[in-house]
Amino acid sequence: MNKGMIFIISGPSGSGKDTVLAEVFKLCPNLNFSISVITRPMRTGETPDGKYRFITREQFEKMIENGELLEHNEFVGNYYGTPKKYVEDCVNAGKDVMIEVDVNGAKQIREKIPEAVSIFVCPPSFEVLKNRLTARGTDGAATVEKRLAASISEIARATEYDYLVINDDLSEAVENTVAIIKSARLKTKMNTGIIDGIVNK
């Protein structure tokens, strides 16, 4: 049996990464999503069985101490991280797993798992990025500028990734992301189980 693959996806605020990812999962039913652990309080609209598992700071620090996280970061006084066990269980069971993470977390994972396939979702231009962040209408000008600066800082690190998906047209961005996943699955080194099963029948 072939092992599963690990995919990393990142993208700044305004890239439309979450929308792209939601569509990708519809088209890739065998792709599993890696749940993150987080210490901040649950927000309105979030559920315990959503994209985050909410734990205490003490629990999180215990996971760090025990080496149970593939990556972790602290942001505005809260910890965010990716549990190692779920990812390892998926891979060993021959299932692919997608890890949604920021640029710092992606770097940590690549250092531990060099074979992970990394994808960066990017807006097509500075103007589009700014318009998307402004169009939300939920933030003041100062907050928008901070988000814009943070997004540009992340985009500057896009060259660290294996693939770049430009999200100008959603359908095309989704199609390209699915194509990356499919092509990565076809790599010879990912199919040695099939080869060995035929040669050593």
Image (cartoon, grey):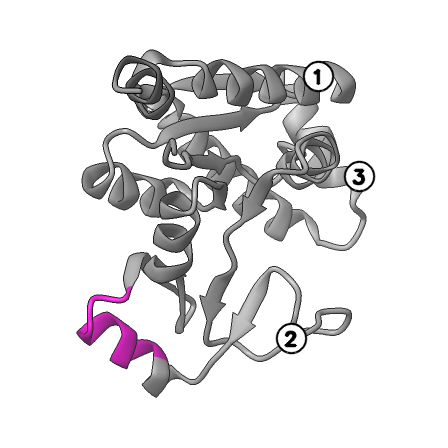
Q: Amino acid at mark 3?
A: Ala
| Element marked by disc 2 | loop
Q: Which residues are magenta?
A: 60-68
Q: Residues within 10 Å of mark 1 (few under 14, many from 20)?
A: some
Image coordinates for residue 197, horizontal then vertical, percent: 34, 22
Q: Amino acid at mark 2?
A: Pro
Q: Residues within 10 Å of mark 2 (few under 14, many from 20)?
A: few
Residue position for label 1: 168
Identify which residue, 31 or 47, lies in the foreground: 31
Residue position for label 3: 135
Identify which residue, 170 or 28, lies in the foreground: 28
Sequence-first disc among 3 and 2: 2
Sequence-first disc among 3 and 1: 3
The answer to whether residue 21 is left or right of residue 38 is: right
Are dots 2 and 1 in contact, CB under 8 Å? Answer: no
Identify which residue, 146 or 122, lies in the foreground: 122
Image coordinates for residue 199, horizontal then vertical, percent: 28, 13
The answer to whether residue 75 is left or right of residue 25 is: left
Closer to viewer: mark 2 or mark 1 = 2
Q: Residue at x 23, y 31 (%)?
A: 114
Q: Main secondary structure of the magenta part?
A: helix
